[in-house]
Image (cartoon, rainbow, N blue to C red):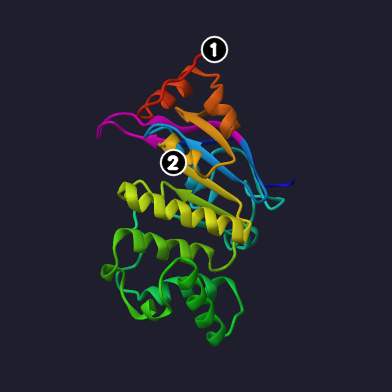
Amino acid sequence: MNAVVSATDIKRFYKVRKGFLSAPMELKALNGASFSVEAGKTLAVVGESGCGKSTLARVLTMIEPATDGALVIDGKTVTGADAETLASLRSTVQIVFQNPYGSLNPRQKIGDIIEEPLIINTTLSEAERKAKVADMLREVGLRPEHSGRYPHMFSGGQRQRIAIGRALATRPDFVVADEPVSALDVTIQAQILELMRELGREYGLTMLFISHDLAVVRQLADRIVVLHRGKVVEQANTEDLFARPQQAYTQQLLQSIPGRAVRTL
């Protein structure tokens, strides 16, 4: 199968100061990440907080540029691309953020929130967009008549359903889900994961799913990349990684899953 996304030695460095008078230091948030995401597959990126997962999400969605390395999406090179190419690529990539309370504009009705990417990225008529919004609300388990309501009128799980509907409305080529269930309680997590599985099958989604929780990604991912201190330290098919982790850091992550003992090699 063809890779929708290919990342080679991706780096993202920041200049930071510890104090007002101190010299700037270089923070290596990503320091050589290489992987690919095959069409129709879900790749999970796991690691502890601060390992570079959310930085990777921002680079992949072109919110921030990579400092170095090569990123190719849909056969087009992102690194060093001109503004027109970046604008075209951004229309094919969508993101679901971690916080369902902060990722939706509280002043917009949810129908307008889902319709917005359709206005920006398609040539659909107003009637066609409204019909698409109604379809997306049904797809994520909400009713079309909810379109006139505001985000504060919904629970956290319902807000994340709205965010998923917004991300999928344009039928993107690639979706980045950045810790999409970590802010939800366990019961709601299971419901959202099941929704993402169902939509993934229905839409043939190509997705990168970011999480600190290996138990969560096992339910969804075809393949797993382990990120540690900005570097990829291991990657394997999901069941292979659970059965035969090669790196000590991966073994530590697996041992943190309640009730699980990890066989070391």
Farthest right residue? 1
Q: Nearer the viewer, residue 134 or 173?
A: 134
Residue 21 inside the magenta-drawn segment: yes
Q: Position of residue 35 (x, y in %)?
A: 62, 36
Image point (61%, 52%), residue name:
206
Quick one: SS at disc 2? helix
- In the rendered image of this protein, does residue 258 appear above or below residue 146? above
* Image mark for residue 265: 1
- In the rendered image of this protein, does residue 101 appear above or below residue 69? below
Residue type at mark 2: give it.
Answer: Val
Circle 2 Cα neighbour tier, 10 Å, few/some/many (<14 / 14–19 / ≥20): many
- In the rendered image of this protein, does residue 192 appear above or below residue 126? above
Q: Position of residue 262 (x, y in %)?
A: 46, 20
| Total marks placed | 2
**Side of 130 where 82 appears, left or right:** right
Circle 1 Cα neighbour tier, 10 Å, few/some/many (<14 / 14–19 / ≥20): few
Q: Nearer the viewer, residue 202 or 91?
A: 202
Quadrant where the image shows the C terminus: top right
Q: Position of residue 171 (x, y in %)?
A: 59, 65
Quick one: SS at disc 1? loop
Real-space Cα distance between discs 2 and 1?
24 Å
Kindly report the secondary structure that dominates the magenta region of the rendered protein: strand
**Side of 47 where 220 appears, left or right:** right
Name the quadrant containing residue 244: top right
Q: Position of residue 226 (x, y in %)?
A: 51, 30
Image point (34%, 67%), residue name:
105
Q: Earlier in the sequence, mark 2 or mark 1?
A: 2
* Residue under pointer 2: 216
Farthest front residue? 259
Quadrant where the image shows the N terminus: top right
Residue type at mark 1: give it.
Answer: Leu
Question: Magenta region: which residues?
Answer: 14-34
